[in-house]
Amino acid sequence: MQKKSVLFFIGLFLALFLQAQEIEKVINEKEVSRIESALSADDMQGRAIFSAGIDKAADFISNEFRKAGLQKFAGLDSYLQSFVLLSPTLEKASLAMDGQMVNDKNMIVVTTKKHLMVTENSGFKQVAVHSMDALFQTASAAIKQGTHTIFWLDTNLSKNFTYLNYFKRNIDGNAGDVIFVLTAQVPKTFTLEATHSFKEKKLANVVGEIKGKTRPEEYVVFSAHYDHLGIGKPVNGDSIYNGANDDASGTTAVILLANYFKQLNHNNRTLIFVAFTGEESGGFGSKYFSTHLPSEQVVAMFNIEMIGTESKWGTNSAYITGYEKTNMGDILQKNLTGTSFSFHPDPYTSENLFYRSDNATLARLGVPAHTISTSKMDNEPNYHRVTDEIGTLDMKNMTAIIRAIALSAQSIIQGKDTPTRVQQEDLK
């Protein structure tokens, strides 16, 4: 064997050895337990948006990013990326259809405009609705994507009509105008007017970054959501939805990955670490974040959601949503060759998980943005329940998963591998 080859393999061995030492020092069961315990503690009050508990969680994450030595993101003066949601109050409204006035109780208007006037010539998409099946999903997508839409609901749906007021609770400033109307038939002509007043409510993502050494304008994002459901009706004396798995586990991973990559300090691409707010309420945090990052420069997104329990394949395994939409999963698995860890395609495709987490906004823009999870969606007994507490999680396996993500990402953060983009036809 030539001398250069020997030196190469010695250098590779030393690099891997030092990397293994670093990962055990930074990503270990003790640190996983420390961070997870803090985020899922009762004093975080379930981390509901607009609560003192979520503010406390944001302060904790910010402090962890500071201790890790992360830079602040995009000119921010802190690790908080703050933004505003609007809570509307209807002042007055009127609707005439085919020349006849309609009772204003038969319409619900979701808008960010103080005064909205819509006619059949306003360019709104019109959808006739005869079943509530998938209406919430369709309407939510229209609001998130800024698609101005009128849903004409058959009068046989009047019993559930008021449930649609859900969409008016908190509205993103870039939301599409969406109108729901109960009617026996779709009108040929109509004129709707609505006047609202608005109350502003503040939210914040927590974001930090490590600048890339040779490709600073190419971004790799590591993310999770830190909000949860807050406090609800007591169940067996417990009213706090701690969200230990959903998604304090993912947020723990993001914090430890930030520490690990900062310690290595050899990333060629810029690494962005973000804890999103508002995922449980409509994905507000990830949507706002995506508008402040050029999607064409985002090379990959590792969104981490519910990794605290074993997957259906047992320990040392996880699945990747939308696995078939890019080659990112193949890259990650290649980088784990020689280890006992395996990534799998999402086995719960009927649950539409690729579009249900914070990866979806960037994925719709073509970014290879995937969620890594172990949650057994057909058998996860503590999901969205007060029993989602740290005692139900496997700290050892969770540590192994975080280490696997760190190792599998290496060729991407170094610029050696670039995942393929999500194609438009794959978003259907």
Image (cartoon, rainbow, N blue to C red):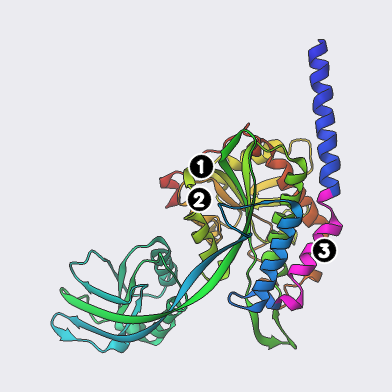
Labels 3 and 2 touching (C-beta < 8 A): no
In the foreground, 36 or 217: 217
Residue at 35% from the left image edge and 85% from the top image edge: 90
> What is the three-letter code of the residue carrying label 1?
Gln
Disc 3 from disc 2: Cα separation: 31 Å
Q: Observer-nearest residue: 413 or 108?
A: 413
Q: Find residue 11 and report its horizontal and vertical position in percent.
A: 81, 25
Rendered location of residue 17, percent (x, y): 85, 35
Q: Secondary structure at mark 2?
A: loop
Q: Tell me the number on the disc at residue 293.
A: 2
Residue 423 seen anywhere in this rendered image of the structure:
yes
Q: Answer left or right for 201 relative to 161.
A: right
Which element carries disc 3, helix, strand or loop?
helix
| 10 Å crowding of disc 2: few (<14), some (14-19), many (20+) | few
- Whole-angstrom CA distance, mark 1 to mark 2, is 8 Å
Query: Residue 263 placed where, x, y %?
Result: 78, 44
Which residue is label 3 attached to?
34
Could you say where residue 60 lies in the image, as x and y percent from the top left? 72, 66
Q: Secondary structure at mark 1?
A: helix
Tell which residue pokes out farthest to the top in this image: 2
Contact (Cβ within 8 Å) of mark 1 with mark 2: yes
